[in-house]
Amino acid sequence: MASIYKSRDKWTAQVNLDGKRRSRTFDRKRDAERWARQEEAQQDATGTVQTVIADLTFNDVIAAYLDEFGEQASRSKLGTIRHISELIGRTPLPDLTSARIREFAKMRKAEGAGPATIGQDLTYIHTILKMGGAVADVDTDAALGAYTKARAILNASGTVGRPTERTRRPTDAELVALREQWAKRRRVVPMWDLTQFAIATAMRLSEICRIRWADLDVEGRMIWIRDRKHPRSKKGNDQNVPLLCGPVVIDGVTVDPMELVMRQHRTDPEIFPHDPKTVSTTFTRGVASCGISDLRFHDLRHDGVSRLFEAGYQIEQVSLVSGHQDWGMLRRYTQIKPESLHRA
């Protein structure tokens, strides 16, 4: 059996072949593991490869995948992969059967994950097995076959499914209630400013907490958003977005996103230097305190896009604000109020 160990910033692989030890040093752990497998496979082409595979766990494949592709993954994806590792990472690769994968889905369901979330988790497992196995030079065909069988059963049972399109938008009364709730005491996180800004710009919470003072064009009323969410590209999808004043009116007051920006403290590079998780949690608690049912921070983005359409903006104009690359995707964010169709 090969030994892999780290010395300073290098990885050394050591194998015992016919009583003789051989070793090589590599920059990356996966390269050391690959060399060791190849050396052992050459010693016994009929059985050694299977022995090596039997000694591997799913965590070994996950590690190989992250070593190669981890820098390209979003924080959300990395968090999901870590949780997958916690639940089934110690499973020996030959034991990653259809039953084991279905058991993982049941565990996620028991944790409160919905059909769409479980489906996304399973997609990550498939990607890791396919790409991580290739990177580690490990045969994962059996596990991939088990995955295909498990996915078919889970699809048929409804454990996995498409996300339900939300139509929830906050009412004016609900927004006023939230404003009054947050005004009761001084807060480090300016929740009312963030709420108004989210609706006025239709930005995602992660984008709001990432925009920087250096990317603000005050005279042109524009803000540069870096690495916006994209269905294919994880990096470099930058966009210059207008800060529109007018489409959003709350409690009779027109919301100006530029005014909201300019009253923030310039103590950090970011305009809203807050943890998105903290903002989301605070919003959820505020909603609960006001007795508001089923309202999430991301619904503010839906509301913002819908208000742009209600104000008369065309789909190509709305996409410049929302960042949607596929105009067809805007449909699920557009819950236009029937009363808005009236013309004076």
Image (cartoon, grey):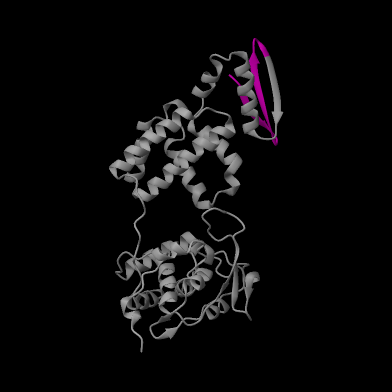
Question: Where, by quadrant of the figure, is residue 146 drawn?
Answer: top left
Left or right of 279 on screen, residue 166:
left
Number of marks in the image?
Answer: 0
**In the rendered image, the vertical position of residue 282 relative to residue 109, given as above or below:** below
Q: What residue is shown at x 57% (from left), y 41% (from top)? A: 66
The quadrant holding residue 309 is bottom left
In the depicted structure, whether residue 250 falls above or below residue 281? below
* Front-most of residues 331 and 4: 331
> Can residue 17 be seen from the camera position used here?
yes
* The N terminus sits in image quarter: top right
In the depicted view, which residue is nearer to us: 39 or 178?
39
Q: In which quarter of the image is residue 18?
A: top right
Q: Specify the farthest residue to the top.
A: 18
Highlighted range, magenta: 1-20
Q: Position of residue 78 (x, y in %)?
A: 52, 47
Image coordinates of residue 159 in percent, x first then y, are: 31, 44
Dominant SS of magenta comes to strand
Indicate the position of residue 24 as horizontal and vertical percent values: 71, 25
Picture residue at 49% right of the left edge, 64% below the top? 205
Above or below, comparing residue 92 to residue 189 in the picture: above
Whether residue 297 appears in this view of the structure is no
Position of residue 169 relative to residue 154, above or below, is: below
Quarter of the picture holding the C terminus? bottom left
Q: Does the magenta stretch include residue 168?
A: no
User: Would residue 18 be counted in the magenta stretch?
Assistant: yes
Left or right for 199, reference 65: left
Residue at the extreme bottom of the image, as rendered? 344
